[in-house]
Amino acid sequence: MDKVALRCLLRERRAMIKPESHGLSRPTRQGRRAPGLSQAQIDQLLHRAPDTYGRLESGRYTNPPVGLLHDVARLFNMTEQEWVALWRYALGQDPPHPLNSRSGEEIPGVWQTVLDGFSHMAYISDRSWNMLAHNAHMKGVFPRREVPANTMRWMAVEPEARTVLADWETAWAPMVLPQLRVALAADPGNRTLRGIVRDVLADPVAAPIYESASSRIRLDGDERPLRHSELGPGWVTLCAAQPLAAPGARLIILHFQPGERRREPVPALRAPADGRGTPQG
């Protein structure tokens, strides 16, 4: 537990909430100058015993329950990044789920400008693989220059994908379909994912691969064969990241190299051994 950081985070967020917005009055007792809700008012709003929130903010609450952290974060209207910080400060770990059920379904609009600045193919999909944004380079992958609305559905069941994604049954499906299965296990109520799985299970080729429950889920840094509709056959290296404001969303950058031969592996990048970011020697 990082008591100092936890106290700073909670005090700052608490000070931003006006008691009047919850039908409460601002305490006027002598010595009370702090803005926002009082600690006692938070206990009242959350229906907790007196000093419950005070123990959390001061760091006196060892291993606070998940329900309390969730209720405080929702009351304080925390962002997903603040939600992660709250867990790390209070429990020393990341939260098991996003704070809001719709997290991962939208990203800041500036991401489109960022994507347009990439020289490689790049796109961002939401937690259900719905396409949120892509750059112009992505269009060249597809024979009709139409980027699919859902990248997982396209990769998993669309006939077009099995011509574009070279060696689909051995190089793509055993990697893609386990990702779908893992995502559904984490979010079983997701109607989009459930619909894709139904289509996969109805596909005589995709179904056995999905049902095999393969553990081959590698994505970031993976290299796979691709038949680019404009550049011809080649190999594409996938680089994956996640916008911090959208848990579950995916930024995918595809580095394409034309040609039949697979490139030599590129060494991993790592900081110098001294850990100070300065060269050795």
Image (cartoon, rainbow, N blue to C red):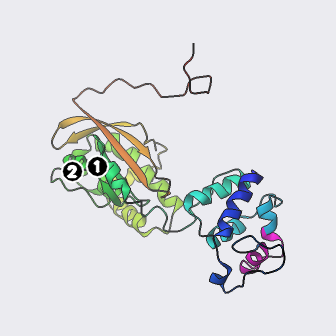
Who's the residue at 58% across and 65% down the image?
99
Residue range corresponding to the magenta coloring: 39-53
For the stretch drawn in magenta, the main secondary structure is helix
Q: Amino acid at mark 1?
A: Asp
Assign a secondary structure to mark 1. Answer: helix
- Measuring from the top left, give residue 58's x and y in whole percent: 80, 60
How many numbered dots are placed on residues in this image? 2
Side (left or right) of 280 relative to 147: right
- Measuring from the top left, give residue 20's x and y in whole percent: 65, 83
Alpha carbons under labels 2 and 1: distance apart: 12 Å
- Measuring from the top left, give residue 80's x and y in whole percent: 55, 60
Packing grade of label 1 (10 A; few <14, some 14-19, many >=20) is: some
Who's the residue at 60% across and 59% down the image?
82
Assign a secondary structure to mark 2. Answer: helix
Packing grade of label 2 (10 A; few <14, some 14-19, many >=20) is: some
**What numbered label is drawn on residue 275?**
none
Foreground residue among 167 and 146? 146
Q: Is residue 44 one of those drawn in magenta?
A: yes
Q: Provide the residue designation for mark 2.
A: 139
Foreground residue among 4 and 158? 4
Q: Earlier in the sequence, mark 2 or mark 1?
A: 1
Q: Amino acid at mark 2?
A: Lys
Q: Provide the residue designation for mark 1.
A: 116
In this rendering, is residue 154 above or below 190?
above
